[in-house]
Image (cartoon, helix red, strand yellow):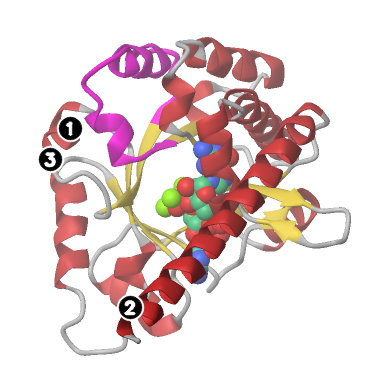
């Protein structure tokens, strides 16, 4: 009897595994033509300077709208775009869209707005990234200091290949960097000292419990102090409540991002947000 249960359980997982693979396979099949037809949309989420309450930047976040009105989120398709290599054309497209968007906001009077773009490790594979970044800046005529590239710890920890050289080449264009999802990735922190990023973004898993208990923030306080001592701005991701915000202000966090102010919005809606809020 136990053996039969075990076997049934095994078969159950087996079926699920196939279904999951089928779904992934179908999605990869649909990804390629979607990239070619620019079926994606870039949403933007504001980053707020906690001291002045001004919008300092917007982060570009990819969305894949479906014909039936539903939306596929990046956590689902970015990994597939990475493993299939499609992240190279898709990532270049996002960079161009984001730089163009930011240049347009400068024309609209938000002359100090920065745009942040996420990068995947897989975008460093073919060595073309520095040229892609340079081209996006040229096409949009956005001054390089208003482009910020968000890197994960995995990218910065890579000691093989040409990642380091490419990052230096991009840095020499005048572009800035942020370290994303800090605290969830690689744990050798040596890169923090050698790679000078402008911002350290504290992952939202450390933020979403803030303001609930009394002494719930020692790790967040420690990360803010790491940022401070290395000359980086600390950014809290995923701020959803006033108590969390107040706690972060008390701890000296520099910038915040989260549903408390706004979800990621399509371009026309974030333009409205910018016109209703003070910007830098
Ligand atoms: P990320 O770069 O850490 O982006 C922040 C994520 O947190 C976004 O999820 C955003 O919608 C979400 N978020 C922001 N504030 C809140 C909040 O208050 N509460 C909650 N629950 N969530 C909040 P999103 O847009 O689904 O993106 C997920 C991840 O996908 C991003 O994480 C990034 O790693 C990746 N991604 C998105 N767009 C791109 C892209 O253009 N290129 C690459 N390579 N990766 C991208
Ligand atoms: Mg990010
Ligand atoms: Mg993040
Ligand atoms: Mg992330």
- The disc placed on residue 191 is 1
- The disc placed on residue 223 is none
Tell me if residue 56 can be seen: no
The range drawn in magenta is: 150-176
Q: Crowding at label 1, few (<14), some or many (≥20) Cα neighbours within 10 Å?
A: few
Tell me if residue 179 can be seen: yes
For residue 161, side relative to residue 174 (left or right): left
Between the residue at mark 1 and the residue at mark 3, the CA separation in whole angstroms equals 7 Å
Residue 176 in the image: above or below residue 9: above
- SS at mark 1 in the image: helix
For residue 145, side relative to residue 235 (left or right): right
Q: Which residue is mark 3?
A: 188
Q: Nearer the viewer, mark 2 or mark 1?
A: 2
Q: Is residue 170 a member of the stretch shown in magenta?
A: yes
Which residue, as the protein is rendered here, is positioned at the far bottom? 213
- SS at mark 3 in the image: loop
Q: Crowding at label 2, few (<14), some or many (≥20) Cα neighbours within 10 Å?
A: few
- SS at mark 2 in the image: helix
Q: Nearer the viewer, residue 280 or 211?
A: 211
Callouts 1 and 3 close, C-beta under 8 Å = yes
Residue 215, given in percent of the width and then of the height, sits at 16, 84
Between the residue at mark 2 and the residue at mark 3, the CA separation in whole angstroms equals 45 Å
Whichever of callouts 2 and 3 sits on the residue coming sooner in the sequence is 2
Residue 90, given in percent of the width and then of the height, sits at 65, 30
Q: Nearer the viewer, mark 1 or mark 3?
A: 3
Residue 37, given in percent of the width and then of the height, sits at 83, 31
Q: Is residue 250 a member of the stretch shown in magenta?
A: no
- The disc placed on residue 3 is 2
């Amino acid at each position: 009897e136990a053996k039969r249960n075990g076997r049934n359980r095994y078969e159950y997982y087996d079926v699920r595994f196939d279904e999951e693979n089928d779904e992934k396979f179908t999605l990869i099949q649909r990804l390629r033509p979607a990239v070619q037809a620019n079926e994606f949309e870039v949403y933007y989420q504001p980053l707020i300077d906690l001291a002045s309450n001004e919008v300092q930047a917007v982060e570009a976040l990819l969305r894949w709208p479906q014909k039936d009105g539903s939306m596929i989120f990046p956590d689902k398709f970015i990994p597939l775009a990475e493993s299939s290599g499609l992240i190279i054309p898709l990532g270049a497209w996002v960079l161009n869209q984001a730089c163009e968007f930011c240049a347009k906001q400068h024309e609209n009077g938000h002359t100090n707005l920065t745009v942040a773009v996420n990068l995947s490790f897989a975008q460093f594979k073919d060595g073309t990234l520095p040229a892609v970044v340079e081209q996006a800046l040229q096409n949009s005529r956005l001054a390089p200091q208003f482009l910020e590239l968000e890197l994960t710890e995995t990218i910065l920890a890579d000691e093989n290949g040409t990642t380091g050289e490419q990052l230096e080449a991009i840095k020499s264009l005048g572009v800035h960097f942020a370290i994303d999802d800090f605290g969830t990735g690689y744990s050798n922190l040596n890169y923090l000292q050698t790679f000078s990023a402008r911002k350290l973004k504290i992952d939202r898993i450390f933020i979403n419990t803030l303001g609930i208990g009394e002494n719930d923030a020692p790790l967040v306080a420690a990360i803010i102090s790491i940022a401070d001592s290395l000359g980086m701005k600390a950014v809290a991701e995923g701020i959803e409540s006033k108590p969390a915000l107040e706690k972060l202000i008390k701890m000296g966090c520099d910038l915040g991002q989260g549903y408390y102010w706004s979800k990621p919005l399509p371009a026309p809606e974030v333009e409205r947000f910018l016109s209703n809020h003070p910007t830098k």
